[in-house]
Image: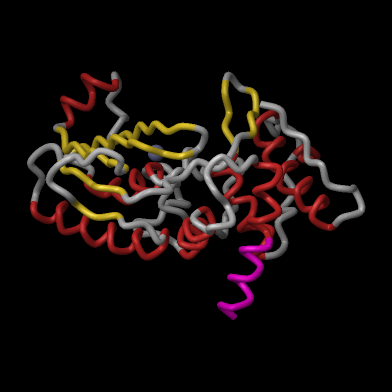
Amino acid sequence: MDDNDEIPPASPVRRNLLLAGGVLTLAAFVVPQLPSSELRDDLTSPADKAVAFIDSLALTQVRNDRLAHTWVRRWDRDVDVLLMTPAPDNLVEDLDDALVTLADLTGLNLARADARVAGRGVFDIYVRTGTEMSEEFGNGLMFCNTHSRGFAGSMRFARIDISEDHPGCLRHELMHALGFTNHWEEPVAHPSMASVLAKHGSPFRSSDYSKWDELAIRTLYDPELPPGTHRSLALGTIRTRVERALESSV
Ligand SMILES: [Zn+2]
């Protein structure tokens, strides 16, 4: 993917794009070894933090150790959530609670259903034993997994596998399924920002959606960010959107 930020250098938006991009570039290519190569905390404002957070979780991918910029991936249709296996009552209740929260944050019709309906989005959710997860995904550390498919950024299908031993990964996997592909992890993860998308056991991990997660989800589902919006355009819209949200929350 080609990623040219066609914004004049004098523009403050341009500066901010470089700032957010710089952090990610360091993350991908620099292994800090000397004090002089430590990551600098350039994210001095809540808006800077929010833009870098959303960018690293939803708009950037590392493939074969190269940083690849990408585009907005999200749902733009109703989504039926199908529980494909038996599940413990508390997990079903937790799922229903999480879907109410996510429907509110995204504006999507996102609810459990019993059958597939053509033309609607689908989350298939499987609750598996630890052994089944290991057999399918090949290592003992894989507690849960999400796989999604779409077309030109418009998501159509997601499959979520949850280990019955780790029901706490449900909200993490649901956020992946919404279009947040990446994890919130070092060295990019800012120490002051918690996320449900930090990995299991990470000090940055929150068990429920953090205020940053909520802001990120609302922002990705803003009508001004349709599926397929290229990152170079999306970052400007995201900054405007988060600045407005942060002002109104003061
Ligand atoms: Zn994950």
Residue 112 located left or right of residue 232: left
Residue 242 falls within the magenta-colored stretch: yes
| Of the pair 237 and 121, the residue shown nearer to us | 121
Q: Residue furthest right?
A: 10
Residue 50 falls within the magenta-colored stretch: no
Residue 21 image offset from top left, x and y in percent = 72, 42
Q: Residue furthest front?
A: 118
Q: Which residues are magenta?
A: 240-250
**Residue drawn 77% across and 37% down?**
37
Secondary structure predominantly adopted by residues drawn in magenta: helix
Residue 81 image offset from top left, x and y in percent = 23, 47
Residue 30 image offset from top left, x and y in percent = 71, 30
* Above or below, 58 relative to 208: above
Question: Which quarter of the figure is the N terminus placed in?
Answer: top right
Q: Which quarter of the picture shows residue 31?
A: top right
State the count of labels: 0
Residue 71 located left or right of residue 181: right
